[in-house]
């Protein structure tokens, strides 16, 4: 069984970050270890929250893992609370990324044209340096604009999205994916790898819930670890995320409790198995 580690916050309530990544990657048949960067009572979309910063715990945890010779087939980073944490996690990656291990960086920085309040102005530049050498990155449109130094454009054309993706790949990324791309009333993801493009769009649902990007990135990582190629993985992650958003749409408490991916995890497992069967039949 493959073992990966994901480094992001643990929000006790809210179906996002670690509490999304661990179940989704487990459904992909991967052992998903988690290193929390912060502990929150609930995600920051609730009116109030209690938070404990764990920056000072990252180094002792990694030293201890080294002492036990623990290694990983993949590393996946999500929300990183500060430039200092980026440096520490960069050091963790240099020490723990063995040859062939998959590195997915979700450059979580903002949404709807705004950078998250807790982040400083130098953060996008730090993130730009951090993504160099990643196998996969999964920015949303806001984050893609921040990484490529563009002013925010909520609805880039496919041509503009492809330009951003080409630039992101030239920063040293194998597979760059922009999420939340919309075209002709549909919503989905568009990616670039080896100078080629892949796109998957699904019907648009008017539902905004926290954890959507985390579910997408986790599902993408799980599919690639299961042997899907990049376009296949993009399709599986997009369709699964859509199914989960659709399920959330009918939930009365959807504003706060995050994306309801749990009832549709079976759909993800089914898509992974079907893709595997198609590959072995080919
Ligand atoms: O990616 C969603 C997320 C992760 N972590 C924290 C959050 C949110 C969304 O609100 O508040 C702490």
Image (cartoon, rainbow, N blue to C red):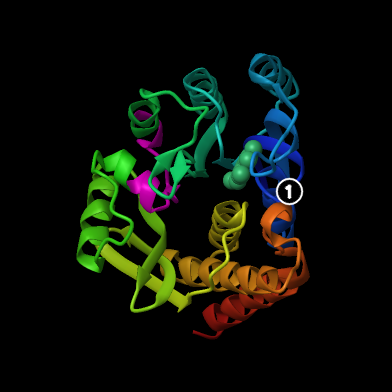
Number of numbered discs present? 1
- Disc 1 C-beta below 8 A from ligand 1: yes
Instruction: Give the camera-side residue of 148 and 199.
Output: 148
| Mark 1, residue position | 14
Q: Which quadrant of the picture is home to ligand 1? A: top right
Q: Say which quarter of the image contains residue 181.
A: bottom left
Residue found at x 55% / y 31%: 80
> Is 154 left, or right, of 103 in this rendering?
left
Relative horizontal placement of residue 68, taking residue 156 as reference (left or right): right
Q: Secondary structure at mark 1?
A: loop
Q: Residue 137 or 2: which is nearer the viewer?
A: 137
Q: Position of residue 141 (x, y in %)?
A: 37, 53
Q: Residue at x 68, y 21 (%)?
A: 53
In magenta stretch: residue 143: yes
Quick one: 72 or 35, which is closer to the camera?
35
- The quarter of the displayed image where residue 123 is located: top left
The residue at the far front in this view is 47
Q: Which residues are magenta?
A: 129-144
Look at the picture and state if 59 lies above or below 207: above
* Neighbourhood count class around disc 1 (C-alpha, 10 Å): few under 14, some 14–19, many 20 upward: many
Q: Residue at x 71, y 46 (%)?
A: 32
Task: Please state which of residues 160 and 121 is positioned toward the viewer in this rendering.
Answer: 121
Q: Position of residue 233 (x, y in %)?
A: 50, 66
Give the residue drawn at x 36%, y 61%. Answer: 191
Query: Picture coordinates of residue 202 (x, y %)?
Result: 48, 77
Q: Is residue 16 above or below residue 92?
A: below
Residue 172 shows up from this direction: no
């Amino acid at each position: 069984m493959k073992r990966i580690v994901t480094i992001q916050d643990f929000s006790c309530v809210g179906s996002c970050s670690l509490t999304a990544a661990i179940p989704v990657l487990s459904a992909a048949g991967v052992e998903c270890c988690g290193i929390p960067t912060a502990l929150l009572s609930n995600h920051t979309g609730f009116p109030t929250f209690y938070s404990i910063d764990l920056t000072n715990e990252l180094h002792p945890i990694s030293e201890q893992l080294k002492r036990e010779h623990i290694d990983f087939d993949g590393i996946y980073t999500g929300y990183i609370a500060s430039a200092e944490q980026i440096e520490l996690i960069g050091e963790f990656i240099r020490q723990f990324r063995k040859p062939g291990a998959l590195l997915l960086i979700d450059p979580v920085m903002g949404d709807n044209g705004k950078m998250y309040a807790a982040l400083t102005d130098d953060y996008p530049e730090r993130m730009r340096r951090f993504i160099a050498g990643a196998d996969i990155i999964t920015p949303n449109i806001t984050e893609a604009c921040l990484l490529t130094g563009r002013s925010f454009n909520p609805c880039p054309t496919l041509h503009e999205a492809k330009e951003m993706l080409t630039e992101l790949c030239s920063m040293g990324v194998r597979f760059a994916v922009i999420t939340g791309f919309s075209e002709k009333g549909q919503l989905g993801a568009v990616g670039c790898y080896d100078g080629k493009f892949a796109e998957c769009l699904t019907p648009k649902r008017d539902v905004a819930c926290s954890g959507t990007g985390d579910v997408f990135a986790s599902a993408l990582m799980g599919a690639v670890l299961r042997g899907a190629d990049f376009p296949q993985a993009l399709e599986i992650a997009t369709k699964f995320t859509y199914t989960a958003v659709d399920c959330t749409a009918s939930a009365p408490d959807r504003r706060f409790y995050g994306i309801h991916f749990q009832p549709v995890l079976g759909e993800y497992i089914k898509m992974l198995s079907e893709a595997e069967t198609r590959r072995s039949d080919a």
